[in-house]
Image: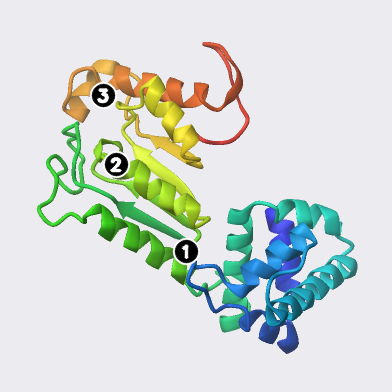
């Protein structure tokens, strides 16, 4: 559905009028949401936005989307359903803004990075041989919580769609969930890259409650002893595997030792 939607929108943006309409909606308000995103939300929810100017803009965007669906024989209700996710709307708005600004390019140029990988902290509980930043203790110049929240707001204000938190080990930092909460409040997708050793059942529940969209757990070897020597801590393999299991259990309908039936892709 994503490819079909972007293809439809890309073709519909081939004329100067469409580009001009979209470009007029790229400016962001104090909450980091563009007029284009608000118009897409109004299209999905079939309701009017607040001001007369925004109403007119949303009406124009609705006409563009409906006309595009008719031209390419796409189901307008299916498009509304797909755009129902705020993160999807943010992503589509990012692509459309890029097309309006730079034209259709391959790869498509965007007005802001689609994804930002943020090394939230230098703290880490492992001593991996391959570590690219000699993680361990916190760096002396790490940001305060207030500064981290400002970074989130700055990223949201530029149109970034997704933040992937890494480290060090991001789950060690007491600010992690507060920062994730702010990212989700600003309708950005949130992911975490972790060694998995700290994902207890309780932490897995917190990850789900925080609406983390993707959890990536690093596991280097199938043999525990080799993995532990590489990771520098005895028991790292066992704890990482348990962290994977806890993550999966938090997002499944049914669980067994032989098969995971995952509703959403939240663990790899």
Residue occupying image coordinates x 50% and y 25%: 248
Name the residue rendered at 33%, 62% in the picture.
151
Q: CA distance from mark 2 to mark 3?
A: 21 Å
Foreground pick, 185 / 167: 185
193 w.r.t. 139: above or below: above
Residue 135, compared with residue 187, is above or below; it is above
Contact check, label 2 and label 1, Cβ < 8 Å: no
Q: How many marks?
A: 3
Residue 183 visible in the displayed image? yes
- Looking at the image, which residue is at 28% across and 44% down? 175
Q: Classify 10 Å Cα crowding around label 2: few (below 14), some (14-19), many (20 and above).
A: many
Q: Which residue is mark 2?
A: 170
Q: In the rendered structure, which disc, 2 or 3, sits on the residue that comes first in sequence?
A: 2
Q: Which residue is mark 1?
A: 160
For residue 227, which numbered disc appears in the image?
3
Say whether disc 1 or disc 3 marks the residue closer to the N-terminus: 1
Above or below — where is 220 with respect to 77? above
- Residue 91 appears in which quarter of the rendering? bottom right
Give me the C-alpha separation between circle 1 and circle 3.
35 Å
Residue 49, image x, y percentages: 71, 69
Mark carried by residue 199: none
Badge 2 marks a residue whose secondary structure is helix
Q: Position of residue 79 (x, y in %)?
A: 78, 57
Element type at mark 1? loop
User: In the drawing, does residue 249 fall left or right of residue 58?
Assistant: left
* Towards the viewer: 161 or 106: 161
Q: Residues within 10 Å of mark 3 (few under 14, many from 20)?
A: many
Q: Is residue 173 left or right of residue 92?
A: left
Q: Nearer the viewer, mark 1 or mark 3?
A: 1
């Amino acid at each position: 559905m994503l490819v079909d939607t972007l293809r439809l929108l890309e073709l519909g943006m081939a004329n100067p009028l469409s580009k001009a309409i979209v470009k007029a909606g790229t400016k962001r308000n104090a909450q980091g949401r563009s007029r284009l995103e608000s118009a897409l939300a109004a299209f999905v929810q079939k309701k009017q936005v607040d001001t007369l100017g925004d109403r007119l803009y949303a009406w124009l965007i609705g006409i563009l989307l409906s006309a595009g669906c008719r031209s390419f024989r796409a189901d307008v209700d299916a498009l509304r359903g797909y755009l129902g996710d705020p993160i999807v709307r943010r992503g589509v708005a990012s692509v459309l803004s890029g097309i309006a600004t730079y034209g259709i390019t391959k790869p498509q140029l965007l007005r802001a990075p689609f994804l930002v990988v943020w090394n939230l902290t230098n703290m880490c509980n492992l001593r991996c041989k391959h570590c690219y930043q000699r993680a361990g203790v916190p760096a002396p110049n790490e940001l305060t919580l207030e500064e981290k929240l400002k970074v989130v707001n700055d990223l949201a204000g530029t149109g970034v769609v997704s933040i992937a938190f890494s480290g060090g080990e991001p789950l060690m930092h007491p600010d992690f969930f507060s920062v994730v909460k702010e990212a989700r409040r600003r309708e950005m997708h949130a992911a975490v890259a972790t060694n998995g050793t700290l994902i207890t059942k309780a932490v897995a529940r917190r990850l789900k409650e925080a609406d983390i969209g993707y959890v990536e757990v690093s596991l280097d070897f199938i043999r525990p002893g080799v993995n532990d020597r590489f990771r520098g801590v005895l028991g790292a393999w066992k704890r990482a595997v348990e962290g994977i299991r806890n993550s999966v259990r938090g997002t499944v309908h049914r669980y067994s030792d032989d098969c995971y039936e995952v509703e959403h892709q939240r663990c790899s």
